[in-house]
Image: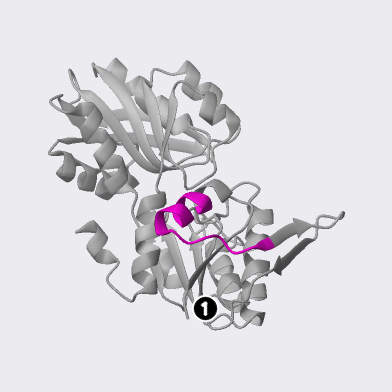
Amino acid sequence: MGMKILTGNSNPEMANDIAAYLNIPLLKADVRRFLDKEIFVEIHENVRGEDVFLIQPTSFPANDHMMELLVCIDALRRASARRITAVIPYFGYARQDRKPGPRTPISAKLVANLITTAGADRVLTIDLHAGQIQGFFDIPTDNLYAMPVLVRDMKAKYESRTVTIVSPDVGGVVRARAYAKRMDAPIAIIDKRRERAGVSEVMHIVGEVEGTDCILVDDIVDSAGTLCNAADALLAAGATSVSAYVAHGVLSGPAMERIAASGIDEVVITDTIRPTDRVKESDKVRVVTIAPLLAEAMNRIAHETSVSSLFE
């Protein structure tokens, strides 16, 4: 029995980096589509009795990548893999973790049920949008944090500078405090009012930011409206500069244009989502890799040792 790694089409570059770190070749497999876009999976190596890690973020197009994940899990289960760990660095549908109004779904729970029913034995993910999603699964779920990777980058860039860690909303205060503790810096909070989904209005800033380099921290940047509004408010309040560190760079719709036109110096994201060509070419968006952290966690799971000690 050994450790094997399979990847779907969502983020093969990350899968290759993880495989290289662990010195384990990726499983030979076809994950392709018929002409009508129906997904077909064929694994070309024996996985009977093996500990298989399936790497597949469910980023855009979320439904296609989610279906790929489910079909790959089913293929591995029917091939008699001993244990199947779904490695989902970016967990799509995580923002639908509760009922925001009457007659609405809790889609994160539905997706958790689908993954479990397909045959996954364990889930490994990074920075879930809501921690309670771990409880949606009836199988072991490890939620890692991009914080060690992002803090290391922050310290290298902002050494000996006066920094304030900023939460772009009240809901992110716990995250901001965790970053501030590691950076030995004060925090500030953006108090905003969201009039409708995808549109935010900055109201005021709680905390002192004048004369400091402000670092916004968040788990997801999607349309970038919140980040850009927050940056404008911080600069208007006297911040020397504003940058952002975010775990998941969804960057949909007008996000790249907004970032380019904003006062943000830089947005640092991880590669949990495969960066597009526009992201790679941007002079304001920088990608840091999370692959070594994921690889180390996978290795510890395979050898039944502590994962939580990675963050101590």
Which residue does the image show at 50% across and 23% down from the upper left?
Answer: 282
Q: Which range is magenta?
A: 15-29
> Secondary structure under badge 1?
loop
Q: How crowded is mark 1: few (under 14 residues within 10 Å), some or many (20 or more)?
A: some
In the drawing, does residue 285 fall left or right of residue 161?
right
Which residue does the image show at 76% across and 64% down from the upper left?
Answer: 40
Task: Tell me if residue 22 is in the magenta stretch.
Answer: yes
In the drawing, does residue 129 fall left or right of residue 233?
right
Looking at the image, residue 286 lies above or below residue 289:
above
The answer to which image quadrant residue 213 occupies is top left
Q: Is residue 11 visible?
A: no
Looking at the image, residue 149 lies above or below residue 24:
above
In the drawing, does residue 175 fall left or right of residue 200?
left
In the drawing, does residue 79 fall left or right of residue 123?
right
The colour mode here is one colour
Which residue does the image show at 54% across and 83% down from the upper left?
Answer: 49
The answer to which image quadrant residue 229 occupies is top left
Q: Position of residue 251 (x, y in %)?
A: 53, 35
Which of 178/42 is in front? 42
Q: Position of residue 289 (x, y in %)?
A: 41, 43
Q: Circle 1 is placed at which residue position?
A: 50
Q: Is residue 184 visible?
A: yes
Amino acid at the residue labelled 1: Glu
Quarter of the figure with the C terminus: bottom left
Looking at the image, residue 253 lies above or below residue 212:
below
Which residue does the image show at 46% across and 77% down from the upper left?
Answer: 139
Q: Position of residue 151 (x, y in %)?
A: 25, 41
The answer to which image quadrant residue 74 occupies is bottom right
